[in-house]
Image (cartoon, rainbow, N blue to C red):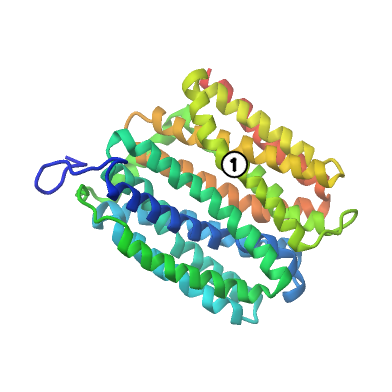
Amino acid sequence: MKGMSAAGVNSSFDHRDPRFWRLSIGLMLASVFVFSNLYIVQPMLPILVNEFNVSPTESSLVFSVTTFSLLFSLLWFGFLSDRIGRLGILNWSMALSVVPLFIIPNVESFYLLVFLRFLTGISIAGLPAVAVAYITEEVSPRSRGLAVTLYISSNGLGAMAGRIFGGYWSENFTWHSSFYLLGTLGIIIALLCVFLLPRSKNFVASDQSFKHDLKGMFVHLKNVKLIYAFIFGMMLQIGFSGIWVYTPFYLEGPPFYLSIQIISLFYLAYMMGIIGSPIAGKLADHFGYVRVMFSGLAIMLLGAMMTAISSVVAIGIGLSVLCLGFFMAHSLTSSWVGMTAKHHKSGASSIYLFSYYIGSTIGGTGIGLIWTGIGWTGVVMVCVCLPLISGVLFYKAVH
């Protein structure tokens, strides 16, 4: 039975056990590094445009190919970890994700840089692929929610830290050195994870074939409600990523002419997202998941529309509201998918995550065509309409 040790005795632990805090701190540190690595390039896209003489849409590939390779690697590492264990994949993933950070500053070809970011997406996928399963197996039910909340919150913290650091450091020093510094931090955190993370005691290897797992996963595509949830998650991320990827280009141009250093401070808006997920969870317990989920959508769309106001203050507030609403809607949709799936729950969650990162890829580069052709007003319109339409269809499906 899953969750039982080889001896047949459950050896899970709760928050009163030092192993809980070793696990939580280790995963939080790993998460901050991994998501910093993913998002560090976002604020420096305007710098890369000038450095490599490429268009804004081309520059967005540095971010989009990372999420693209990440989403496919998530599925592979998820299947693999069910057979060989969680910690080995996590530790190797941490170690290998450091390597491109020391090569990227030395490249002279933009498309070699894109290829290295593609490899980065593969290497960082090990953590998000196994983290929640590792927590579920090793932490007792009474403390599992706390461990997952700490881990997910650190995802947002890492995304915010990577963006702020990438923008500030590349503006004041060089974009090259920011990768060296992050790589050095990654080595330290990878070593800490080896010593902090408790060995798996409750992992039981799956004896099912990959074909069986895939069949169990894709059976969820016969559930209309889940299909709309997957589409909704994708459109949420298209809207969210589309706004954030092109915010630096918008704010560095007329009428604002802000520096990359100042623009990077706008990523502090992610603090609203970090607190948004746990707040949404508490509200959902009282008012229901669907009601709070779509309230989050409404808040997100309000924030997106506020960024159309030609005021730095309004844009800053709008981005904060956008983050709050997005993380409310996303976290509850993810939970709703897990609760709605009657079997192969991990498969349903994997498809949702796959859809989510597809949205990140499209939002990163696909929205660039709108930015180039229409400008910021067009970006806002698309990033409002797509989540709104998919949200209306999803709402009708669940009622």
Residue at image location 45% in from the left, 33% down from the top: 335
Q: Quadrant of residue 239?
A: top right
157 and 252: which is toward the camera: 157
**116 left or right of 188 in image:** right
Task: State whether residue 206 is above or below residue 290.
Answer: below
265 and 221: which is toward the camera: 265
Residue 393: x and y in percent read 60, 26
Q: Quadrant of residue 80?
A: bottom left
Q: Which residue is mark 1?
A: 273
Density class for disc 1 (Cα within 10 Å; few <14, some 14-19, many ≥20) is: many
Task: State whether residue 203 is above or below residue 261.
Answer: above
Quarter of the rendering occupied by the N terminus: top left
The amino acid marked with disc number 1 is Gly
117 and 265: which is toward the camera: 265
**50 left or right of 396 in image:** right
Residue at image location 52% in from the left, 44% down from the top: 355
Extreme residue in the left direction? 7
Residue at image location 55% in from the left, 59% down from the top: 36
Residue 338: x and y in percent read 40, 33
